[in-house]
Amino acid sequence: MYYKEYGNTGIKVSAVGLGTMRYDDEDIKAGRLEKCAEIPLYAYEKGINYWDTAPFYCDDKSEEVTGIALSQVDRSKVYVTSKVNFGTLRTQNPDRDVFRKRLELSLERLQTDYIDFYHMWCMLNLESWEKHMETLYGFFEEAQGEGLIRNIVFSSHMQGNDIETVVESGKFKGMLIGYNALNYRFRQSGIRRAYEKGMGVVVMNPLGGGLIPQSSEAFSYLTEGTDLSVAQAALRFVASHREITVTLAGCTTKEHVDDAVKAVENLQEEPAQVIMEKQEQRGTSFNNLCTGCNYCKGCPKGIEISKFMDAYNHKILTGKAEGIQQRINAHWCIDMNKAAECIACGKCEGLCTQHLPIVERLKETADLFVRK
Ligand code: SF4
Ligand code: SF4
């Protein structure tokens, strides 16, 4: 296993981490939690020492499963995470007791006395981050003072510039963000600044919500000169960034763990800037694809833009217009007729991180698939 330093904490973590939101659904539903725990135990055997969990993952069983495994290994050799935000606490103004109960529940489920990395979870924008700072951060510090949590970190879906603002606050040891071969361009400044500040950077969604392995032809360039599958190469692409500490791989089976391990064999790190330049030279920057960031939300006509644009990605990647229809009907299960309701107000295009021609794509979709 290839290990990296987690920011300036002095902790060494595996370059791939275990994402615990994909334990086998049938086993979870049937209550076979011991069986699910075989996955983190196998990951441990393979040297994966960073396990990322949270309340609500896997029908709210992920922490429990992870705890079963944690109780069977040398605790000091695993770095486990969990998360909290207003949503988890079910109140906008939590008091100390509400926070404590939530943290104690996570500790109990994880069968541990402390959590290594505790996240201020899913900060959508600066406004939500500021509110969480005012209300929750003090509790985090208190829990840290008591040794219940060791490092305060955050997870975010913010854009580069906003992430930088949070990084500059100097209040966090690390962060968890979505990053992959599709969206890397608009997350560059954030990861670079975090690295310069001595923070750890953990990445979720390295496979672009499954679109990258599903479009293996378009992303086959990632595998050039290797014997890796597209999914493995996509993990390696992320892990090879010098600025990125841990790349999370959601694992349902032991084969998924093996894939993650193989992805970082003999890893060679490079600065994000160099990786980006290489991508641009190859002409594989995919600037014309929707990344699913959802910054365009809030359409006055109630159009679920990111879902339509995701469907349009399938046309671009497969070269077949039917890909749009399939995705809308079979995957998203939304009303295709909404595509025809766009009034071309332009609000979404002003917000789109990829500067996509959303109006034009909706019109094309409507012309093709909406009956007049
Ligand atoms: S341009 Fe169309 S899709 Fe975009 S916000 Fe306006 S109505 Fe909605
Ligand atoms: S259309 Fe643009 S803003 Fe909306 S999800 Fe896609 S990339 Fe993000």
Image (cartoon, rainbow, N blue to C red):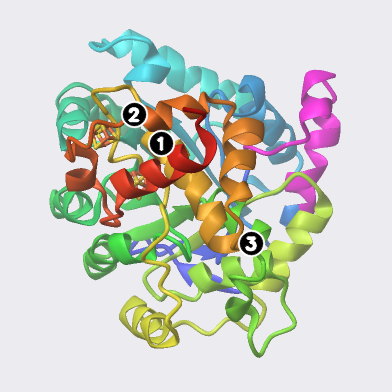
Gap in Å between the C-alphas at discs 1 and 3?
Answer: 40 Å
Q: Residues within 10 Å of mark 3 (few under 14, many from 20)?
A: some
Is 145 or 275 nearer to us in this picture?
275
Q: Secondary structure at mark 2?
A: helix
Q: Secondary structure at mark 1?
A: strand
Query: Which segment is the magenta one?
Result: 21-42
**Three-letter code for the amino acid on which mark 3 is drawn:** Ser
**Three-letter code for the amino acid on which mark 2 is drawn:** Ala
The dot on residue 114 is: none
The dot on residue 215 is: 3
Question: Is the C-beta separation of discs 2 and 1 under 8 Å?
Answer: yes
Report the residue at 18% width, 40% height from top: 346
Q: Quadrant of ligand 1?
A: top left
- Provide the residue designation for mark 1: 149
Report the residue at 36% width, 66% height from top: 287
Q: Is residue 337 left or right of residue 59?
A: left
**Three-letter code for the amino acid on which mark 1 is drawn:** Ile
Q: Is residue 29 left or right of residue 205?
A: right
Q: Is residue 127 left or right of residue 182?
A: left
The vertical placement of 14 against 307, above or below, is: below
The answer to whether residue 199 is magenta is no
Report the residue at 25% width, 50% height from top: 159
The dot on residue 143 is: 2
